[in-house]
Image (tube, grey):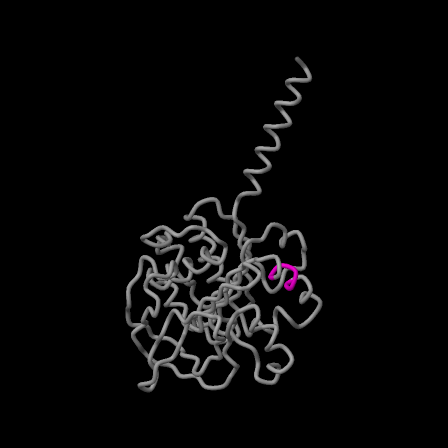
Amino acid sequence: MIQKRVAIFCVCSMLVISIAHAQTKVLLVGQEPDHPYGTHMYMHTNEVLAKCLALNGKIESVVSDSWPKNEKMLERVDAIVVYSSPAAELLLDGPQRNQVDVLINAGVGLVTIHWASSVKQEDFDRLGPKWLSYLGGTWISNVGLELGESALVQLQPDHPISRGWKEYWIHDEFYLNPTITDEATPLLQATSNEKPVVVGWAYDRPDGGRSFATTLGHFYENFQRVDFRRMIVNAILWSAHVEIHPSGARVDLSQEDLALLPELTP
């Protein structure tokens, strides 16, 4: 009888561990703002996205200021979200490159937002090929950008990232002439100076992982819009291989959660 109870206990324990590990884990990487207040609010925005992800099932979100120094934060990660200065340098310059390479080759998802969807012009020859293999495309910083308003058009309305939101007008900073590989799928398009500009793309990588990049996200006010948040959260869930509801991800946060506190001045 004792042996039977021990066996049952072991099975139950293994089940609990299995369920715990079945939880999706998302690592959100940011940094302190590098632009005027109200733009490039990296860490605050990542915290908002983490709150949105919590509304969509068993999802553990970990927010890190730059690449994590504690390797335990990388355990069981299903997707990495980067909202920062050019992410090619953040991920591929330095000792963290090996950690990133292991995760990407294991099929971990990758999402980059705004400036993070780029590589510096002077680093393209050195980092570009590896970066393109991760992301399926890139913007070369800072070669061509314009502030303006445009309709945000879904180029692939049937893609899971397009669920639950429709075309709308957006005020943002548009990165011109992104480099997108033939293997990637353009998803989002804006218009700048009467010319179409791809501002978002998805990439089903050969390693089985999924990547999504958008060059939008300059102004924090865009993240306060339901449609914009839903597009980003849809992309994060898609990259983590989480099924997205037909009406899109839940992103219904309170005004308090979405508020940007007044800038602290000396």
Query: Against 35, is 102 above or below?
Result: above
Residue 261 falls inside the magenta stretch: no
**Based on the displayed image, in which of its 4 quarters is residue 120 positioned?**
bottom right
Q: Residue furthest right?
A: 95
Q: Is residue 182 left or right of residue 29?
A: left
266 vs 193: above or below: above
Give the image location of residue 170, x and y in percent: 32, 72
Q: Between residues 257 and 218, which one lies in front from this camera angle?
A: 218
Q: How many numbered marks have been drawn onto this rendered protein structure?
A: 0
Farthest-out residue, top: 1
Name the side, left or right, on which 225 lies relative to 235.
left
Is 127 placed left or right of 144 in the picture?
Answer: right
Q: Main secondary structure of the magenta part?
A: helix
Residue plotted at (37% across, 59% down) = 230
The segment highlighted magenta reads: 100-104
Residue closest to the eye, 187 or 43: 187
Residue 73: x and y in percent read 62, 53
The residue nearer to you, when weighing 123 against 263, is 123
Displayed quadrant of residue 172: bottom left
Residue 142: x and y in percent read 51, 84
